[in-house]
Image: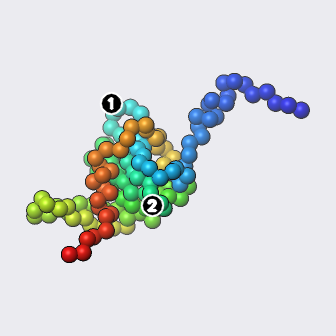
Amino acid sequence: MFFVLHPLVAPTVIAQIRPNVQSLPDGDYRYRDSFGIDRPFREIQFRKQDKYITGSDSDQRTGKSYCFRGIPQQNNIINITVATEIFPKTAQQTEWKLAPGNPINFDKLYPLQAGPGLELYKCLTAFLPKLKD
């Protein structure tokens, strides 16, 4: 017995197979919930390094944006800590308030080829270790 694959079936199946967040190699990534640039979208930029993912989650529909750090598990980020900016009286250094956050699921998000933007770099500083005086 042998099987003949239809030539149009294989590319469709392959296109639907996306690596989950946990299996991504270390690096910077960008995901969106829409390919349409002309309408509001949710975008997540993150850096995967070792066993952690640190990034920003911004939603143009709600105007909300926050920084996060968590651990990848399959296609989710769990054990999330959220960082929100506390505006200091001086503009020399941003202070951050850390709090527990909700898991992030990537099942309905699409990877983009474009590199990460400024939001990611700002969020990476939120989770830097505090320097001792």
Number of dots carrying numbers? 2
Q: Mark 1 points at which residue?
A: 38
Residue at the bottom extreme, as displayed: 133
Q: Residue 52 carries which label?
A: 2
Residue at the right extreme, as displayed: 1
Instruction: Name the amino acid type tagged 1.
Output: Asp
Which quadrant of the figure has residue 103? bottom left
Q: Residue at x 32, y 57 (%)?
A: 124
Residue at the front extreme, as displayed: 133
Marks 2 and 1, how far apart in space?
33 Å
Does residue 92 appear to the left or right of 9 in the view shown?
left
> In terms of sequence position, does the residue under pointer 2 or pointer 1 come before the other?
1
Give x and y (percent) for residue 46. Answer: 39, 51
Asked whether residue 33 appears in the rendered view, the answer is: no
Q: Is residue 116 above or below residue 128?
A: above
Give x and y (percent) for residue 18. Answer: 56, 42
Q: In this view, does 47 lie above or below 31?
A: below
Give x and y (percent) for residue 21. Answer: 51, 51
**In which quadrant is the N terminus drawn?**
top right
